[in-house]
């Protein structure tokens, strides 16, 4: 099974900022990360007026848009069932990946690095460190029972992830 590691935190703690630094660092080490990003917002990856958009809106349950550079699968979920992270991971091409990083999904039963940023409006005492938390990345020193990483050091976090992957 491909390793899945969530980057979890309150809004504004820097999940996307960290991933934008972490993904190139992991790639430079020869790792092939995939990414699943959770959003609470209604979103559309297609462009209104384009053929693919119009055909999807006509009632196609799934639409693949493909070119020589990339392809995307869009699946309609009108029942609004809760998101199933395991299902989403299973949709990825595991032969092309070494690791799936997940932004969000902080309540899922998967390994996670929890982020804490001082001045984010939360106190460190509010951190939820369940049995799935493998590390905390913070911009301040914290007294936690798991590894505490420097939130602003993607190299240190990538080192930790490589060691975590080896120890699984």
Image: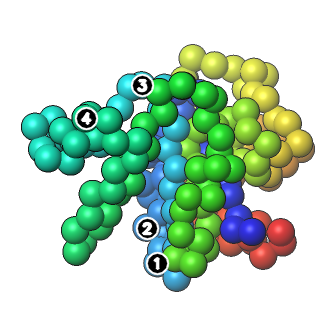
Nearer the observer: mark 4 or 2; the answer is: 4
Q: Which residue is mark 1?
A: 28
> Which residue is pictured at 18% across the width and 38% down the height?
54
**Quarter of the figure with the C terminus:** bottom right
What is the CA distance from the residue labelled 1 to the residue labelled 4?
Answer: 43 Å
> Which residue is pictured at 22% across the width and 68% down the height?
67
**Disc on the earlier residue, 4 or 2:** 2
Q: Residue furthest left?
A: 49
**Disc on the earlier residue, 3 or 4:** 3
Q: Quadrant of residue 80?
A: top right
What is the CA distance from the residue labelled 1 to the residue labelled 2?
Answer: 6 Å
Q: Is residue 134 left or right of residue 60?
A: right
Q: Which residue is mark 4?
A: 58
Nearer the observer: mark 3 or 2; the answer is: 3
> Which residue is pictured at 26% across the width and 64% down the height?
66
Q: Residue furthest top?
A: 121
**Disc on the earlier residue, 1 or 4:** 1
Q: Which residue is mark 2?
A: 24
Q: Which residue is mark 3?
A: 41
Q: Is there CB contact under 8 Å for labels 1 and 2?
A: yes
Nearer the observer: mark 1 or 4; the answer is: 4
């Amino acid at each position: 099974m491909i390793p899945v590691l969530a980057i979890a935190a309150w809004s504004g703690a820097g999940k996307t900022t960290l991933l934008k630094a972490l993904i190139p660092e992991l790639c430079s080490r020869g790792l092939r990360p995939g990414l699943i990003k959770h959003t609470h917002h209604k979103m559309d990856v297609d462009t209104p007026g384009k053929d693919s958009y119009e055909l999807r809106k006509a009632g196609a349950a799934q639409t693949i848009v493909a070119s020589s550079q990339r392809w995307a699968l869009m699946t309609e979920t009108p029942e609004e069932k809760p998101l199933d992270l395991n299902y989403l991971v299973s949709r990825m091409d595991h032969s092309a990946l070494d690791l799936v990083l997940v932004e969000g999904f902080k309540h899922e039963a998967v390994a996670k690095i929890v982020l804490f940023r001082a001045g984010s409006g939360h106190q460190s005492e509010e951190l939820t460190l369940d049995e799935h938390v493998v590390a905390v990345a913070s911009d301040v020193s914290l007294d936690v029972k798991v590894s505490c990483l420097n939130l602003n050091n993607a190299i240190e976090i990538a080192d930790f992830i490589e060691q975590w992957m080896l120890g699984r």
